[in-house]
Image: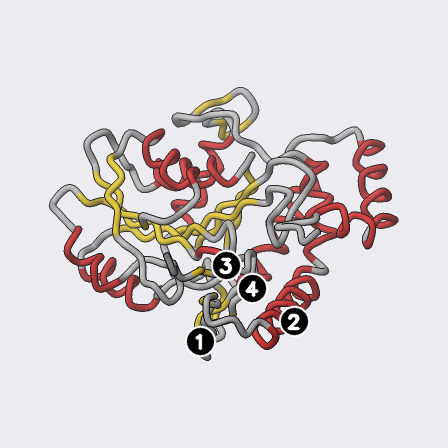
Amino acid sequence: MIYFANPKSEYIFLKKKINKKINDVLNSNSYILGNEVRQFENRFSKYLGLKYSVGVSNGTDALILSLKAVNIKKGDEVITTSHTAYATIAAIVEAGAKPVFVDIKEDDFNMNSAELKKKITKKTRAIIIVHLYGNPADIVEISKVAKKNKIYLIEDCSQAHGAEFNKKKVGTFGDLSCFSFYPTKNLSTFGDAGIVCTNNKKMFKKIKFFREYGWKKKNIGVSEGYNKRLDELHAGILNVKLDNIDKFNKKRILIANKFLNLIKSKKILLPQKNNTKKHVFHLFVIRVKNYI
């Protein structure tokens, strides 16, 4: 059996550390937005090379809060790729906007930046670029298009923890970036969790308000808000696993390289490697030619 993902294997490898962390959290008497969350936010920001991160309930909510932070409203258009997880579109619809789709390139399954320009209208307010399967999209060119048209750029990095474009980590090119830590992700916990990252202090503060009822202090609301918090247990597990993300990605790349070297069938189209990108192989996606 070849699994698409096997989170249990990571648990077995890190069992002592994860069990100790869970025990520490359970005995801390602090379970929501405590030291583990703050530590993970700071460490993940440092890992990416950004100033701010806000831990949230899941990757979908990370996208929803990011869209709200850039003031997406009903009737606005948000451009994204035609080939992505359902959550990307669900977030756009939940924010009240209309999703506008751009087709993908054949070589990496990511948004075709040449087609992007044709989709921009007066109603376009944001672009959500997805780094699919762990392979960075054409983020530099897409960033140029967003800046030229004064459109917000949000990176959906839910399948691309640790991936790089020109030796710079994805999640550091847009106005905001969103990550999921669902159990099958490259960096994962054993449940739902997510994070929003940015260098923009104003957006950082907005998202912090949004994730917990709009509170400035407990029970003192200053803005629109929700309940979309990251809890201490998942943050604690993520603190353990963050130490190993590069090691785990290295193993994924090693296995992918074996597949690339050993699969010789002309009927199978393999993923293409690119020297400007660090593909972290969340999935090893092949195409099969139709010989009917």
**Discs 4, 2 touching: Cβ within 8 Å:** no
- Mark 1 = which residue? 274
* Earlier residue among tags 4 and 3: 4
Q: Quadrant of residue 73?
A: top left
Instruction: State the CA–CA distance, disc 2 to disc 3.
Output: 15 Å
Instruction: State the CA–CA distance, disc 4 to disc 2.
Output: 10 Å
Indicate which disc residue 254 carries: 2
- Mark 3 = which residue? 285
* Earlier residue among tags 1 and 3: 1
What SS does tag 4 mark? Answer: loop
**Discs 4, 3 touching: Cβ within 8 Å:** no
Instruction: State the CA–CA distance, disc 2 to disc 1.
Output: 16 Å
Mark nearer the viewer, 4 or 3: 3
Which residue type carries mark 3? Val
What SS does tag 2 mark? Answer: helix
Quarter of the rendering occupied by the C terminus: bottom left
Q: 174 above or below 168?
A: above
| Residue 8: percent from left, percent from top | 76, 46
**Discs 2, 1 touching: Cβ within 8 Å:** no
Mark nearer the viewer, 1 or 3: 3
| Residue 182: percent from left, percent from top | 60, 42
* Earlier residue among tags 1 and 4: 1
Which residue type carries mark 1? Asn
Q: Does 205 sit left or right of 116 as displayed? A: right
- Mark 4 = which residue? 280
